[in-house]
Image (cartoon, rainbow, N blue to C red):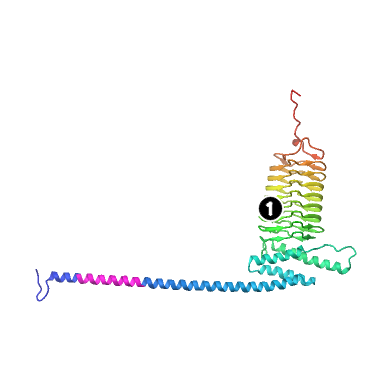
Amino acid sequence: MVIEKGGLPLARLLDLVKLTLGVVAGVGGMIALVVAYRRQKLAEAAHDLAEIGENRAQLAEQRAHRAEQREATKLHNDRFGAAAGQLFHDSPAVRLAGVHAMAGLADDAPTRELRQTCIDVLCAYLRMPYSPQPPNGAPESDRLASAALREVRHTIIRLIGAHLRDGASASWQGYDFDFTGVVFDGGDFSGAVFPSGTVSFKGAVFSGAIVSFKGAVFTGAMVLFGDAIFSGGGVSFADTVFSGGMVLFGGAEFSAGTVLFAYAVFSGGMVRFTKAAFSGGSVVFNRAEFSGGEVSFAKAEFSHGIVHFNGAMFSGGAVRFNGEMFSGSAVRFNSADFSGGVMDFASAVFSRGIVHFNDPATWSEPPSGLPFPPPEGLSLPPGWVPSAPKASAED
């Protein structure tokens, strides 16, 4: 054993040094742990404070947004009352100003529900009793009042049509429109797009002037023309696209004037003329394209007037004339193209009138359900006339 003079042995001294260094290292580690723990707590506290601050900011923002909405709704309601008062004013000029005010209010509405309310008011104005022409012998003041009322109504229709077209500064596409029983003596819905919602023309009367749906697109809405009356003037669905949704003409009456479906495209959805009455005027489907979906004329009655499908293309989907009564109209499918899909005349009754299928462009398969032998008035190409059954040896 080596002993230093006046001190501890060297080995013992080295052990003490190691022990001291171990203690120092342990203390240092403890200090580091404490420091790390403190840092973590401080970071957590800072994060909590930041989160609290963020939550407070969000709550403040939400309160500000609600306050802004309340203020916007209050302003909207104030403007709504003023516009409604103008719309039902005695003066036609003030009413016309009210129409534009209500349309502008719909554009600026802070919620969908408030916009729908403005649209409902404009439609309600159109549903009010209206006679396109004053009685014969009516005084000049009545004729002027009628002309002024007509201007107000046509302005509403024009503004609605403009808001239903693509590219409108404020779109009203997809909203509900209730034109039930409205008298239309003119109007322009050309290029309108109906992607969703419900649009009702039930019981509407189209008479005296042109109402245009030319180039309109029906993609997903429920559009109702049930029991509508087409009694004069003209209604144009030319170039219209029926690609989805449901368009119903059930019980509609086509008694005068011209209704055009020329070059219309029926590519999807459902279009029904169930129990429609074609009793006069002209309904024209010339060059229309039936490539998908279903078009049904089930139990419709063709008693007078002219219905033309000349040059129409039946390439897909289903077109059904089940249970129709062909009793007086001239229905022509001249030069039509029967290249695909289903066209069915099962249970149709041919009692009078003329139904022509002359000179089909192509026909991979003729329509099904045509009667044999063909009754008088039903004109078929030679290849479509079924041959009489051959007599058996026992006959």
**Residue 392 image offset from top left, x and y in percent:** 74, 25
Q: Is residue 29 magenta?
A: yes
Q: Which residue in the rendered view is the most extreme toward the right?
A: 137
Determine the residue positioned at 85% across, 68% down: 144
- From this view, report whether residue 377 is shown above or below residue 245: above
- From this view, report whether residue 129 is shown above or below residue 52: above
**Residue 335 image offset from top left, x and y in percent:** 76, 43
**Residue 85 image offset from top left, x and y in percent:** 74, 72
Q: Nearer the viewer, residue 74 or 3?
A: 74
- Bounds of the magenta segment: 19-38
Res 37 seen here? yes
Q: Which residue in the rendered view is the most extreme toward the bottom?
A: 6
- From this view, report whether residue 95 is shown above or below residue 395: below
Determine the residue positioned at 40% across, 71% down: 43
Q: Secondary structure at mark 1?
A: strand
Residue 64 vs residue 305: left or right? Answer: left
- Residue 395, by quadrant, is top right
Q: Nearer the viewer, residue 25 or 87?
A: 87
The amino acid type, in three-letter code, at marker 1 is Met
**Label 1 crowding class (10 Å Cα cut-off): few <14, some 14-19, many 20+?**
many
Q: Is residue 198 magenta?
A: no
Give the main secondary structure of the magenta stretch. helix
- Residue 361, by quadrant, is top right
Which residue in the structure is indicated by mark 1?
A: 246
Residue 186 vs residue 163: left or right? Answer: right
Res 286 seen here? no
**Residue 262 image offset from top left, x and y in percent:** 75, 51
Q: Point out the image quarter for the N terminus.
A: bottom left
Q: How many marks?
A: 1
- Residue 183, by quadrant, is bottom right
